[in-house]
Amino acid sequence: MDSFEINKIIAAIVVIFVVIFGITKISDIIYYVEKPSQSAYKVEFAETDSTKASASVEAVDISALLAMGSVDHGKKVFKKCSACHSIKKGGRNNIGPALYNVLGRNMGALEDYKYSKALIAFGKDWTFQEMNSFLIKPASYIKGTKMAFAGLKKEKDRASVILYMNANADSPLQLP
């Protein structure tokens, strides 16, 4: 192959690129559309599940909620939690911290577990109300938490898990 053939191939490739990019630029000029200064319609956002959840959390009477649950049902529902958490006395931390004696202690209190900065900064104690609010949807209650669990939507399930966690303690908290 002589240099004349190579020049023709290179020229053909250059012409193809010029034509393709030229057509796009020319079509942009010919079919120029000016963007409107304001939207043609306004998008209104409906109330999301997390907003509804936080509103319902504030309105919940915790004693009435806990009356719905039972420790036996909580033991069954807690199986979802046991993939990441241990509830046994002296149990070790897994993906999540050990939950024995969790109610009544400060959030982020276990020294041998690395909590998220968001949970430590939240800085409250695990009360019945806090646990209920957290279990609805952990990621929306404490933004930035490491807990990727979707939450427990059913009130009976949440109440039962809270009662089960309270029962797994050296000195369970008195029910409200």
Image: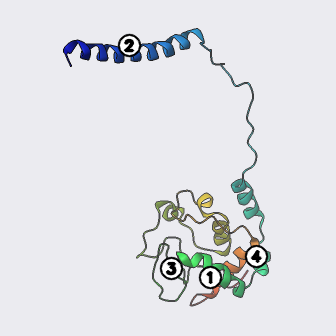
Earlier sequence position, callout 1 versus callout 4? 4
In the displayed structure, would residue 59 be above or below residue 93? Answer: above
Q: Circle 3: is it few (<14), some (14-19), or many (20+) Cα within 10 Å?
A: many
Q: Residue at x 44, y 13 (%)?
A: 19
Secondary-structure class at tag 4:
helix
Secondary-structure class at tag 1:
helix
For mark 3, what is the residue? 98
* Quarter-of-image position of residue 52: bottom right
Q: Nearer the viewer, mark 2 or mark 3?
A: 2
Secondary-structure class at tag 2:
helix
For mark 4, what is the residue? 156
For mark 2, what is the residue? 15
Across and down, in percent, residue 1 comes to: 21, 19
Q: CA distance from mark 1 to mark 4?
A: 14 Å
Q: Give the amino acid type for the residue marked by disc 1 in the picture.
A: Met
For mark 1, what is the residue? 165
Q: Nearer the viewer, mark 1 or mark 4?
A: 4
Across and down, in percent, residue 72 comes to: 70, 88
Q: Is residue 72 left or right of residue 17?
A: right
Q: Residue at x 76, y 45 (%)?
A: 46
Q: CA distance from mark 1 to mark 2?
A: 73 Å
Q: Nearer the viewer, mark 1 or mark 2?
A: 2
Q: Give the amino acid type for the residue marked by disc 2 in the picture.
A: Val
Earlier sequence position, callout 1 versus callout 3? 3
Q: Residue at x 43, y 73 (%)?
A: 113
Residue at the extreme front of the image, as rendered: 1
Residues at marks 1 and 2 touching, judged by CB atoms closer than 8 Å: no
Q: Circle 4: is it few (<14), some (14-19), or many (20+) Cα within 10 Å?
A: some
Earlier sequence position, callout 2 versus callout 3? 2
Q: Is residue 51 visible?
A: yes
Q: Give the amino acid type for the residue marked by disc 3 in the picture.
A: Ala
Earlier sequence position, callout 1 versus callout 2? 2
